Image (spheres, grey):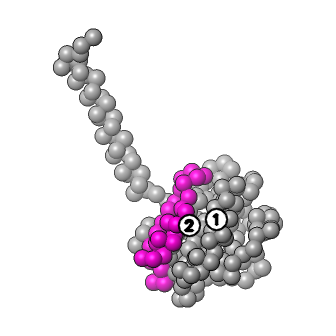
Amino acid sequence: MLLTPRCLCAVLLPLVLCGLFAATECAAADDDLPGPAVGDVAPDFSLKLLGGEAINLSDLTKESPVVLLVLRGYPGYQCPLCTKQVGRFIAAGEKLKDAGAQVVLVYPGPAEGLDKHAAEFVTGQTWPDNFHFVVDPDYTFTLAWTLRWDEPMETSYPSTFVIGQDRKIRFAKVSQTHGGRASVDEVLEALKQ
């Protein structure tokens, strides 16, 4: 069957318009990504280690660049993708230290039971001395950084940031799914800049 030019236009025009609409929606969605963007000054925060000692971003960046991993915390279970990502970063701890970085891992969730779940998450891990595992009770940090994934069985968008000593964000990757997380190689490359 041959299509006439008029028939071909009737078929193709809606497809082209749908494609343009989809491209516009995608571009708008990129502008609406949660969290701070590359070039922004990272908002300061103070979060507690499991032992209770507080750390501040402003103090850490005086010493070195900071790699900030925002995990999903405890959405009702220990996230296997968080466990895998953290394992990769721990395995690369020496490379990250050689790159001059400190690594802060944020474990968000409701305050009730958060320390218990965080302790379960870190059990059996050997942490490099340049790693800081902190809790974010009641999503104080997560909300301030607009990373709260406010859906059932969700806590925060899995996110990775590289923050320079001037507190400017050099690298940002925020996943709006459970996967799509930053790799160690991406972070090491950002630390070279």
Whether residue 172 appears in magenta in the rendering, the answer is yes
Q: Is residue 6 left or right of residue 73?
A: left
Nearest the camera: 8 or 31?
A: 8
- One can see residue 148 in this view: no
Furthest toward the top, the residue is 1
Q: Picture quarter containing residue 143?
A: bottom right
Q: Start and end of the magenta stretch?
A: 164-193
Q: Is residue 56 left or right of residue 118?
A: left
Whether residue 93 appears in magenta in the rendering, the answer is no
- The residue carrying pointer 1 sits among few (fewer than 14), some (14 to 19) or many (20 or more) residues within 10 Å by Cα, namely few
Answer above or below: position of 93 versus 147.
below
Q: Which residue is mark 2?
A: 184
Nearest the camera: 135 or 112?
A: 135
State the quadrant of the N terminus.
top left
Answer above or below: position of 31 versus 101.
above
Spot occupied by residue 56 in the image (x, y as percentages of width and height): 61, 82
- Disc 2 residue type? Val
The answer to the question of whether label 1 and label 2 lie on touching residues, with beta carbons closer than 8 A, is: yes
Q: Which residue is mark 1?
A: 88
